[in-house]
Image (cartoon, grey):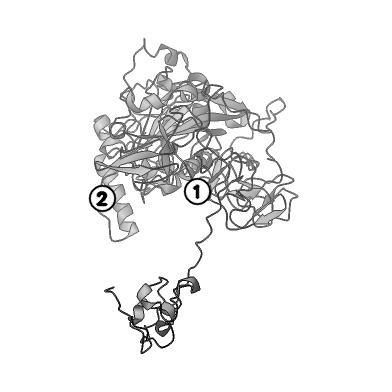
Amino acid sequence: MPRPLGLLMIAASALAHDMHEVEHVHHHGLRCGTKEPKLDKHKHGRALAKGDCSATFTDPKPKYSPTNGPVYRINTCVHIIMSTDGETGPVSEACVSGGIAWLNRDFRATAGHKGSGSVDTRIEFLLVKTTTHRSDAWMGQDHGETGGFWEAATGECDVSSAANIFIKTPPGGILGQANLAAYADGLAPDGTTIGTMAWGPCATSSSYGLGATATHELGHYLGLHHTFNTDCQGSEGSYSGSCSAQTAPGCYAGRTLSTPGDTICDTNPQNCAVYDCASQGSCGHDEPVHNYMDYSHDSCLTQFTEEQARRMRCSLTSFRSGIFTTIADGYVAPVASPPPPAPPLGSVSPPPPSPPPPRCTCAPSWTYNSVVSSGCANPDSDANGNWCFSNEDAGCLLSAGQADGATPSNTEGGGAATASWFYCGAAVHSPPPPPSPPPSPMPPDASKCSCQASWTATVNGVALAAGGCANPDGDRGGAYCPSNEGRGCVKPGGQAATLSYFYCAACACAASWTHAGVAGEGCVNNMCVTTHGAGCILADGTQAASSYAVCTPPPPPPPTVVVPPSLPHAAPPPACPCPSYWLGDHECDAACNVAACNYDGGDCVASLRASPPPPGEVATCTCPNH
């Protein structure tokens, strides 16, 4: 759901900036722009049939508890919407992957992070596709408008098959928007929009830059209401801010879409949103200010409750059953047994034991130093062996054969990873193996994208000539090129090109490398290990099939020509009738072809030398004008 963020002047300090952002959100009364549509019994009849987690009621049955079921892994597509000129809104692949990792961190309550005290919902997000689009019209489009950027949600990203996240700058300064699960009908619009300034590790907002916007909006997408729903939301309603009575199950008895309450019993009643993480005690007790579904700044939001997790799992299986796969994840259902006797009246039951941290598993796709890798790999030739970024981030439990980055020699497993990556050995140690990816929307004969040999880019009306993988106009996204194949070809990252051009990286040889026991520097015998790995663009415009690829050695430097310095012309012999610069100039001048001129300084060969005059005669010379 959207959270508004004002256009602020840069404050004198990060703290002042943070306070200004929070005050702006509070002043406008809306941090999230997700709105509940009016209830239509005909259009939403299917939603009304799902009584355990309808729009107005929650029955958190034990069967929906995360501890009583498998992991649900949601197929997720991320679409980056930037301005037509590419100046506004670019997001790197590393930032896209990082944002997905942060979602998993919050929904899985990863140990060692700010949300580690939350409930592990056992809901995960698997990135199956990333697309990039340049369109000013799409940048300015509201989330609820049909057409436009929703055209990207096709094939494996159809709204009935995947969760679609659009990263762009929503109009009106809102940070995010989403569609509620109970109204899903398999048709767009249905997904989430997250502001570029609030997404992932590249977020630029000081108050809303820790990932809670995406967690909040995906909470709506999976059926959750605001904890204060719907009191004091300003533009969404003019309510009195009264405290609503809770009656389990469903708590807010007789709730409608125009009365307060989030239908959740283990979130305290709350009459208005909290923006600064300070509870007001407005309903006689602390408001759930740390709940992801309130409006505080990101560093304050750290929790989902058990009943919220149950409502999300109910909503996912009831209204969005086509977007996820079920992962056993080593879970063993408890053996049925009689319930234990009730504790004596007045006694306090011990809290349930904390679940063990999840096992470390390799991310299916990750980027390091601009090299895209899959699963367990070694893109930087690490001497300690293969490694990967984990799905679980720091704190996950290492298995046998895996090693922590701090102690790469200890492969016995059992410890916790201290970083977001770990050594994974020759293969991915992630029991059970990840599910097979969804079928590709690309036709079987789809070919790899290749760069046109020559093309032009027009900048401010001026055509700039380019060829292959290049960046003639300084595109912030990096080098790119029009493809020979047009739309639908396979880009270096494995995705289908949705436009007639694609971003590329020209292959460059590593300064020093080793391949199959052979060491080299630069281009050796027209082969080298590239710095970009497989998929970079070769000189002929095609993609390299592996990191060991054909290269063109640089031409040898031109030979150095040493020109002797010019010597000053000496005076001609006294009897020579020629000027000195005629002598020895590599041309035989007949007037100088006499002994007195040393036969033109040696320029005239012997056969051309003049015969000496007969005895008694004096040689005379009449020199022509030269």
What residue sits right under mark 1 in the picture?
A: 114
- In depth, the one of 570 and 430 nearer the eye is 570
Location of residue 82 (image quadrant): top left
Q: Label 2 amino acid?
A: Leu
Q: Are marks 1 and 2 in contact (CB under 8 Å)?
A: no
Give me the C-alpha separation between circle 1 and circle 2: 27 Å
The N terminus lies in which quarter of the figure? top left
> Is residue 331 positioned above or below 571 on the image?
above
What mark, if any, has residue 189 been given in the picture?
none
User: x%, y% of residue 458?
Assistant: 29, 40
Tag 1: amino acid: Lys
Q: Nearer the viewer, residue 416 or 349?
A: 416
- Can you say whether 230 is above or below 44 in the image? below
Give the image location of residue 260, x and y in percent: 34, 28
- Is residue 339 shown left or right of residue 299? right
Task: Report x, y in % for residue 287.
Answer: 39, 41
Specify the quadrant of the image occupied by residue 43. Answer: top left
Q: Which residue is mark 2?
A: 8
Whether residue 481 is visible: yes
Quadrant (top left, top right, bottom left, bottom right) of the C terminus: bottom left
Q: Earlier in the sequence, mark 1 or mark 2?
A: 2
